[in-house]
Image (cartoon, rainbow, N blue to C red):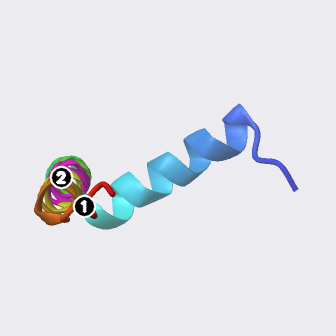
């Protein structure tokens, strides 16, 4: 089942009637900041993993050449 533009508008009007414009805009802002924090966490986690990998590679000893 696909939702067309008419159904989406009806759903939006019902949500606005139930929660009010102020609360819907606040929820949207909170959702946006949550997504931004999630992306920031992913970036920081990737940087930490890359740094740990670099540290491990630099600490490995190479076997002596015979």
- Name the residue rendered at 11%, 63% in the picture: 59
Which residue reaches farthest right?
1
Q: Is 21 left, or right, of 11 in this rendering? A: left
- Which quadrant holds the N terminus? bottom right
- Name the residue rendered at 70%, 37% in the picture: 6
- Name the residue rendered at 69%, 45% in the picture: 7
Q: Main secondary structure of the magenta part?
A: helix
Q: Secondary structure at mark 2?
A: helix
Q: Is 14 left, or right, of 33 in this rendering? A: right
Residue 19: % across, % down: 28, 64
Q: CA distance from mark 1 to mark 2?
A: 22 Å
Magenta stretch containing residue 42, yes or no? yes
Please tell me which residue lies in front, 55 or 47: 55
Magenta stretch containing residue 35, yes or no? no
Circle count = 2
Q: From which residue to which does the magenta span run?
A: 40-48
Residue 64: % across, % down: 24, 61
Say if residue 14 shows up in the picture: yes
Residue where numbered disc 2 is placed: 54
Say if residue 30 shows up in the picture: no
Residue where numbered disc 1 is placed: 64
Please tell me which residue lies in front, 5 or 38: 38
Nearer the camera: disc 1 or disc 2 = 1
């Amino acid at each position: 089942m696909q939702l067309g533009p008419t159904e989406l508008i009806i759903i939006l009007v019902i949500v606005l009637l139930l929660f009010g414009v102020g609360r819907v805009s606040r929820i949207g802002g909170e959702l946006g900041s949550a997504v931004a924090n999630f992306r920031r966490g992913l970036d920081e986690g990737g940087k930490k993993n890359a740094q740990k990998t670099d540290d491990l590679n630099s600490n490995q000893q190479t076997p002596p050449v015979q």
